[in-house]
Structure formats: C-alpha cells, structure tokens
Amino acid sequence: MMGSKGHTPEHPAETMLSLVGKKRAILIMCHNNPDPDTIASAAALKYIFAQRLRRKAVIGYDGTIGRAENRQLVRRLKIDMVRTKDLNFNDFSVIALVDSQPHTGNNAIPRKILPHIVIDHHPMRKDTTRCAFYDVRPIYGSSSTILTEYLRELDLAVDRKLATALYYGLKTDTNSLSRSFIKADLDAFNYLFPRIAPRTLAGIENPSVPKSYYLKFADAIAHSVQYGDVMISCMGTLNTPDVTAEMADFLLRMENIRWTLCMGEFKEYLLLSVRTSRRGWIAGKIALRVLKGLGTGGGHEKAGGGKISLEGLKPEERAQIAQKVTDRFLKALGIQDREGKPLTAVVPADPL
Ligand SMILES: [Mn+2]
C-alpha cells in the first residue's frame, strides 16, 4: 500500500525533547497557507516546549490564512503566528516542521536548511530521513492526532483552547471522520472532545463570510464539468488559496461523483485540489502524476493537491496549463469521454 510506510521512534515525545536539550531559540514552521491541522499541531508543540523546557518557541508561516474559519481559529484561541518575511531562519538553533516535510514545495524553509524536527502524516519523503528527529505516520488522519499522543505521553494537561484547536485540526483533516482515519484518530477525538470549549468551537466553525464567498461558489459551479464520475471545476481567480479544497469537498458529495478536481489562480500560482471517495492511497498519487514536471504537490489517500507557477505566462498559456492538468487527470483516471457535461446544463424537468 503506497504511502502507508512511516517512521515513529519509541517514546517519540521524550526523544524529541532530549534532542532539543538546552538549545534556546526554537522555530516551529507550519505549511504554506496554513490549515487548522498545521496550526493546531504547531500550537501543541509550542505548548510542549513551554511546559517541559521553559522555552518560548516562535510559530512561523508563509502564504495566507485564508478561510474565515481558520482566521477565527487563530484569533479566538490567541495563537501567535509570525510571517516568514518577518523571521530570519539563521536566528534559530532548532527548527521544527509540522504537517509537512522538507523539499515538498509547501513550506517556506529555505532549501539549504534541513529542519531538526519533522512531525507529519503525509507519505514519507526521502529527504526527511536526514533530519535529526522525524515522526511520520502516513496512515494517521491528522498531525493533530500525533501531537495529542505526545501530550498524553508527556502527561501534560491540555487546556480548553489547545483541546479545541487540536480537535478542530483533527476534525477538518478527516472531514469529520469521513476521510481516512484510524483508531488512533478516534482515540484522540474521544480524549479531546470532553476538553473543548463548545461555544468557541461553534464560533470558529460558523464565522460570517463576505458576499464574495458565495459569488465564488456560484462561479465555481457555473464552471464545473462532469466526465462520468469525475467533476472538474476551473474556478478562475481565487480570493483565498484554500477555496479549491473547500469546493472539491463540496462537489464530492454529489450523487455518482467519485472524484473531484478544483483549480484556480492565486498570486501567480495555479492551485489545485483533488478529492476522491475511493480507497487505496490514490488521491495524492494522482495529484503527483498530474503535476509531474509542472509543479509540486502530493497528498493523502483521499485528498491531494499542489501548485504550478504561472509567473510570466500569458492568459492563453495559463489556459493551456489548466487544460493540460484536466487532460492528465482524466487520463490518469482512465476516463475515455473527454467531452464532458457542464454541471449547469439544463436537464429535462421530471414529469409531474
Ligand atoms: Mn494534516
């Protein structure tokens, strides 16, 4: 089974702490355009360093905290996050990377710097094995699950804020346990749930959103085309980078749809998200195949994605890339019919 092989040291939390030892300045890096899982994992790691080593770590990120939910998560739980442009990587003696791995193209750690600590649940990358400490568990539903285990291994009390963050990270990464999860995720879920702040969580999950959010949804639906059990949406210019993932989840709920691909342009990049309801470590693999030679990406069993640089390209060249992505995706899935049917095509009314 591709992507199921990982690596977890014995007593991972203690091993990690002994490695940090007396080193002073610690940077915890999230992946780009951070999602709740990377944010919560970073917050948990920061808490562990504060409790056990009396060190105040810095949480860094690059890109945009886009979704209204994610902004609420950071604001309501008061998670301090610093943009990488305001950081100097050389100022830190320890760099930890959560929910990502070196040289994947989705984190801002410079190529020549190898993080000391990597905690992740994506398929194992070769370069990760060169890091001093790595704990990669591809079969886990979230990195938040791994960090919850660390807190339990170290017997550290989890306050309401941190429990809420980790719970939300786990919940969103597994799409409310509708995507891949294992017993460890359920155990973390059951551990965290009695400790969360329910009203705070409700505020995070139901933020008000601008009118443009609905217009983008309307636009995405208007540009969705169905090919058998595949739905592809070219969403045009995006307001936030993570809306392709949201739309890919949204469209996957449609009857008879087993695969979705949503793509759109954000700051000189074509971003894409792939989802499937099929099992077997394929979404990330398909994403990689689509992106080969064009950009970077990867993913999990049922969710994947990536990005392609569009810098300096003319509109028609950008359109060609989107077409190439579509063609490769359909080819990878063995779809013969390349005509496609617009989602909004008029269907005959049901007889009364
Ligand atoms: Mn994750």
Image (cartoon, rainbow, N blue to C red):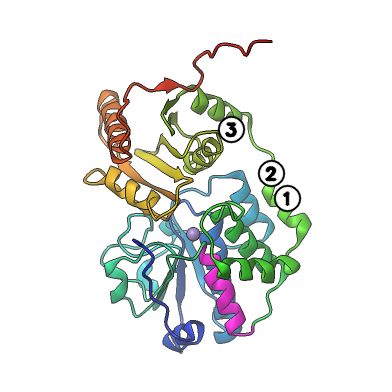
N-term mark: 2 or 3: 2
Q: Residue furthest right?
A: 199
Which numbered disc, 3 or 1, marks the residue that appears first in the sequence?
Answer: 1
Query: Depth check: 336 or 119 in front?
Result: 336
Task: Give the Cα separation between the discs numbered 2 and 3.
Answer: 12 Å
Q: Looking at numbered disc 1 in the image, what kind of residue is underneath it?
A: Gly
Residue of label 3: 213
Task: Let me know if residue 150 is in the magenta part.
Answer: yes
How far apart in space, not on screen, are marks 3 and 1 (Cα)?
Answer: 18 Å
The image quadrant that residue 90 belongs to is: bottom left
Pick the front one: 194 or 311: 194
- Please, what secondary structure does the residue beneath circle 3 have? helix
Q: Is residue 12 magenta?
A: no
Q: Are marks 3 and 1 in contact (CB under 8 Å)?
A: no
* Magenta range: 142-155
Does the rendering let one see residue 81?
A: no
Badge 2 density bin: few <14, some 14–19, many ≥20, Cα 10 Å? some
Q: Residue reaching furthest front?
A: 351
Q: Quadrant of residue 147?
A: bottom right
Q: Position of residue 237 (x, y in %)?
A: 43, 30
Residue under pointer 1: 203
SS class, disc 2: loop
Q: Position of residue 337 (x, y in %)?
A: 32, 25
Question: Which residue is label 2 attached to?
Answer: 207
Mark 1–mark 2 CB contact (< 8 Å): yes
The type of residue carrying mark 3 is: Tyr
Residue 21 location, quadrant: bottom left
| Marks 1/2: CA–CA distance | 6 Å
- Residue occupying the point 39% across, 49% down: 283
Categorize mark 1 by other alpha carbons within 10 Å: few (<14), some (14-19), many (20+): some
Give left or right: position of 294 versus 156: left
Residue under the point 53% across and 49% down = 65
